[in-house]
Image (tube, rainbow, N blue to C red):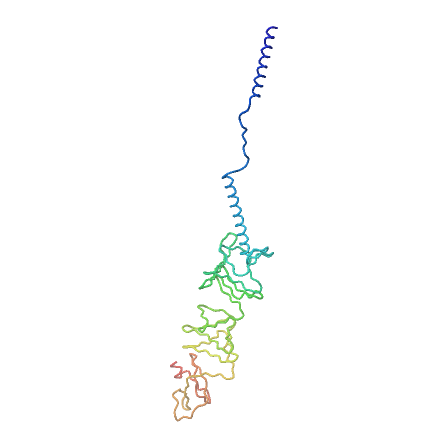
Amino acid sequence: MDRSGNLDTEELKMTREQYILATQQNSLPRTEHPQFYPVGIYGWRKRCLYFFVLLLLVAMIVNLAMTVWILKVMNFTVDGMGNLRVTKKGIRLEGISEFLLPLYVKEIHSRKDSPLVLQSDRNVTLNARNHMGQLTGQLTVGADAVEAQCKRFEVRASEGGKVLFSADEDEIVIGADRLKVTGTEGAVFGHSVETPHIRAEPSQDLKLESPTRSLVMEAPRGVQVNAAAGDLKATCRKELHLQSTEGEIFLNADTIRLGNLPVGSFSSSSFSSSSPSSSAPQQTIYELCVCPNGKLYLSPAGAGSTCQSSSNICLWS
């Protein structure tokens, strides 16, 4: 009991001392001033912030002015810009347009009342490729020539799509109703020519000529040469052969003349052919004779045949 009583007395003293100390501290005069901290940006930081805000405002104004200027210069509208118009059918360009990079389109066509012009300082090349990207056709329009590289080249008529001209590795076909060659030297063919009809222009002559070799015309069912309003002339330097292996050569005309045939002589006393006598009367009627070798000559007509196989004309021919 005594010990506990002593502990209570000590605790009471300590509590009293603490109270006194606390009371003394509160009663002492405060000599320190309270510190106030300002809120915000002041000084050079504030000036820099205002400068950057002003600079940003100027940049926005310049950017807006440039945007308005570009819209006005490029002629931007709801449908497109400048000469470019976006329609339901695609893109429409009006006027002259330049493309600096490749252009990939499905179809290019002009207006109904104006042509389509593709122009280049060097050449214009059109390429066609397959699904593998390999080049299958090329058309190049240059300053010196127009070149086409493809398996088959065709030119068709605008009406009906008739093939007027086609070319491939094997043959060249001209499907026009009339082929007209206006050159002064005519047409030159290095090999054979197969055609159903050769005709000259009205009031013009048709001439088939081989200056250094022979001229051959062949047909399985016959060759017809017809001059409806003029003369037909066949001239050669050496020999002209008219040959029919199975049929006949038929000459049908009002007058058939064989010029420059040699003329034999006939006398009542001899059947030999000799030079005509100056005292004999002039002969007006002749007989056409044929030598064994096929040569023709004229012999003065008589009561009987005056043709002789041993005639000098036949012997020296």
Between 83 and 204, the one nearer to me in the picture: 83
- Name the outermost residue toward the top: 2
- Asked which quadrant contains residue 240, the reply is bottom left
Between 212 and 4, the one nearer to me in the picture: 4
Whether 26 is drawn above or below 300: the answer is above
Q: What percent of the width, then of the height, locates residue 250?
A: 51, 79
Whether 32 is drawn above or below 21: the answer is below
- Name the outermost residue toward the right: 1
Q: What percent of the width, then of the height, locates residue 53?
A: 53, 44
Between 85 and 45, the one nearer to me in the picture: 45
Task: Specify the quadrant that holds the N terminus.
Answer: top right
Between 163 and 83, the one nearer to me in the picture: 83
Q: What percent of the width, then of the height, locates residue 31?
A: 53, 25
Whether 59 is drawn above or below 110: the answer is above
- Asked which quadrant contains residue 185, the reply is bottom left
Q: What percent of the width, then of the height, locates residue 125?
A: 48, 59
